[in-house]
Amino acid sequence: MALLNVSRLTRYYKLSNVQAVRHYHKVSKLFQPLSVKPKDATVTKDEAISISQKLLMDTGIISLRSNGMFALLPLGERVMMKLTKLIDKEMSCIGAQRLSLPLLTSGDLWKKTGRWESTGQELLKIEDRHGKEYVLSPTHEEAITSLMSEIYPFSFRQLPLRLYQINSKFRDEMKPRFGLLRCREFIMKDLYTFDNSVEAAHDTYQEICSAYDRIFHRLRIPFLKVTGDCGSIGGTHSHEYHYISPTGEDTLCVCDNCGNSKNAELVSSDKSDSCDKCGSHVHQVAGIEVGHTFLLGTKYSKPLKALYQNESGKPELLQMGCYGIGVSRLLAASVEVLAEDKNIKWPWEIVPFKICLIGPKKGSKEASSALWVDHLAEVMSGMPGLLDEVVVDDRDRLTIGKRVMEAKQSGYPFIIVVGKRACEMVPMFELLDCTTGKSEFLSHKMLMNWVRELP
Ligand SMILES: [Zn+2]
């Protein structure tokens, strides 16, 4: 027995001791089809195109596959993974557990809550070979509440409970537009909370809102949190998180004095220019909704009979909340808000690559400096914060200028050019900081110092 344990330990030790491979990416091998432009046949003439849609398609980050449906290409997938990781981290801090529910939800459940009829044509209904009806879920209140209803007796000791997923949702938009901002298939983070009382559900609501604040703060894009419309989800209490952008489809009323903000849908037109809290002037801005929170009460637990057993052993209805972040929309909205001069600018936390290295053109006078490129790429990608974060534009038949232009368009925050001055006695490398627009020449030592100080 003891022997077995030792051999297991050795095996574990050996595995965990495997050296991390210093891996960097090469643009020549990246699947980033820059030249694939949407044909007239795929984008109808009256379809509105936004800055983010154009830039994300032009740079090979997303690809339009059919009306309102996009493929996330490898660079887009990298951004999505980082966004997901950021969200997972904050969800874990508030004790939320991730799960996955099926994309299809039984039509019967949607009939029980009344949304089968009330949702309208945005709800895509399908039938399987046995004639059973399903919805291609745009949201999962029915699915998760039904799950909870089937595990009675569910003890009060397990509350509060917070469950979320990050996966595809579907909404059959009449007019998909602006790329990932309003498409038919999208990726959403949806969190559902369960509490034993109205008060506890309120506390949960505040706690989740703080987690949302942290997520949006970490992306460092100014956002506006406004009182929202409960709409088709229902409930008693709702807030929306918005990025301010002329492309935004929501109108927000913001008080100049106290900051009280609301979705214009909640403001009657005769009171639209004065604040209902302090009476001061209210101005309007357009916003892209990136997050939404709802306090649901028993709107779903009642029809679907989702109960828990209280301290005296009696069944009681679960108090619920639901909280969404449009993750694919957030990706596009970041581009929409931050883009400058036809160049994407990513929030630092979600850049597809942190550093892009560009070497000399083949056959040019400075071609001998090419040796530096692999050396720098290897050293940098071996640093803790840069593992898998370095890309080399090795297409050496292209000029440096052309590659710098494309690296800027793709939104890489730092570009290092190994050019003419890398052939000098003391080799100098050009560092282009796309976050500030500044550039400077650094020696090898200075460059290494700079790299070590990256966040
Ligand atoms: Zn006010």
Image: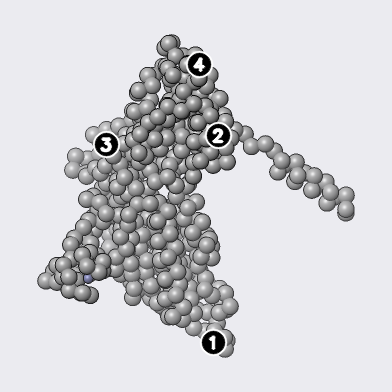
Nearest the viewer among 53 and 402 is 402
Q: Identify the disc placed on residue 425.
A: 4
Q: Position of residue 140 (x, y in %)?
A: 42, 63
Which residue is the site of mark 1? 314
**Quadrant placement of the N terminus:** bottom right
Q: Is residue 218 left or right of residue 244?
A: right
Is ligand 1 within 8 Å of the beta carbon of the residue shown at mark 3? no
Name the residue: 48% across, 16% down. 423
Q: Earlier in the sequence, mark 1 or mark 3?
A: 1
Nearest the viewer among 399 and 108 is 399
Name the residue: 51% across, 23% down. 373
> Marks 2 and 1: in contact by CB < 8 Å?
no
Which residue is the site of mark 2? 381
Disc 2 to disc 3, how far (Cα)?
29 Å
Q: Earlier in the sequence, mark 1 or mark 2?
A: 1
Disc 4 to disc 3, how far (Cα)?
37 Å
Which residue is the site of mark 3? 341
User: From this viewpoint, is residue 383 visible?
Assistant: yes
Q: Position of residue 38 (x, y in %)?
A: 29, 34
Q: Earlier in the sequence, mark 4 or mark 1?
A: 1
Residue type (three-letter) at the residue carrying disc 1 = Lys
Disc 1 to disc 3, how far (Cα)?
63 Å
Q: Identify the disc placed on residue 16.
A: none
